[in-house]
Amino acid sequence: MKAVICYYSGSGNTKLISEFIKNEIQELEFDLHDIKKDGIPDFENYCLAGFATFTDFLGAPQLMYSFFEEIAKQNNKYAFVLNTYGFISGVTLKTLSKLAQARGFTVISGYSLHTPENYPPMRKKGKDFDHAPLAKEIAKLTLFIELLRKQASTIKSGNSPETHPVKIGFLNSILPRMSRKQSKKDFGIQTVDESKCITCGICKSVCPYGAIELSPKPVFTHDNCFGCWACYNHCPTKAIHTPKFKGEFQYAKPAAELKAKFS
């Protein structure tokens, strides 16, 4: 029997953890599905679906909302939810659960994992969390994986798994998701230092909202931009600038310590 983890990963943290969970749970054969590149999977092929993303301005990224809108209504298919976060998780996990339930999934468990921060303004303030997750956080993840392993085994046997309601802490529960207008305002209007740009096209390929074209240098459609910082973080020559940042404090891939913990 097969399962799928549908993930969105801006800088690789969420993808890394999704791969780790896939390898740790042998009871089902897992596929990994990148929602940015792979579209909508055929959930009829899977007995369990996972939905994983990073926290973006205290909530789920806009791309996750768009992804769920395109999913056909399911008939109580089992699902779990996962989010990674740097500074604070916000309502991401609860939002993922609600989005999945609205499409007919039965959410059986969920977990939020502290990982390094990929948001340049926070990294500038020294809140990079490059040592995350700590030992106690990894121990909690291990417990979650054990739970998920038992649930997967129960599903494989043809029975209904025990459901563990998705819970978030009080502080997370009272922090509303920030608006995309606010996130774009925080990002500002990005520009390109053409003397540094090598027209590699990476910025266009990583943009999840189709806000960048090459002509031959990057041209931004600011009405489509949600201020996610992907183009900024991934520019190899630091040619993409914002009003307050000129290539500093990028986070383009998982920190070495995080990779060592979950490789």
Image (spheres, helix red, strand yellow):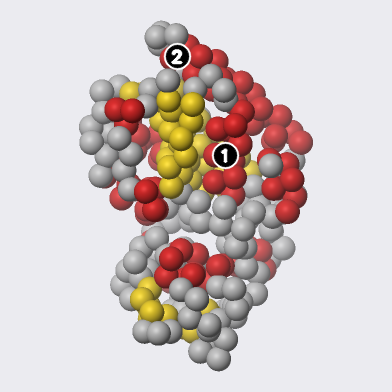
Q: Is residue 61 visible?
A: yes
Label 2: few (<14), some or many (≥20) within 10 Å? some
| SS state under label 1 | helix
Q: Quadrant of residue 123?
A: bottom right
User: Is 252 rendered above or below residue 79?
Assistant: below
Q: Name the spot of residue 20 as percent of width and height, x first.
A: 61, 36
| SS state under label 2 | helix
For disc 2, the marked residue is 156
Judging depth in this view, the residue of 87 and 37 nearest the camera is 37
**Residue kind at label 1, given as amino acid type:** Glu
Please give the name of the residue rendered at 31% of the width and 72% of the height, measured from the top-left corner. 223
User: Is 20 rendered above or below residue 145?
Assistant: below
Name the quadrant of the N terminus.
top left
For disc 1, the marked residue is 19
Q: Is residue 176 visible?
A: no
Q: Are marks 1 and 2 in contact (CB under 8 Å)?
A: no
Q: Name the spot of residue 70 as percent of width and height, x first.
A: 25, 44
Please give the name of the residue rendered at 38% of the width and 79% of the height, measured from the top-left corner. 214
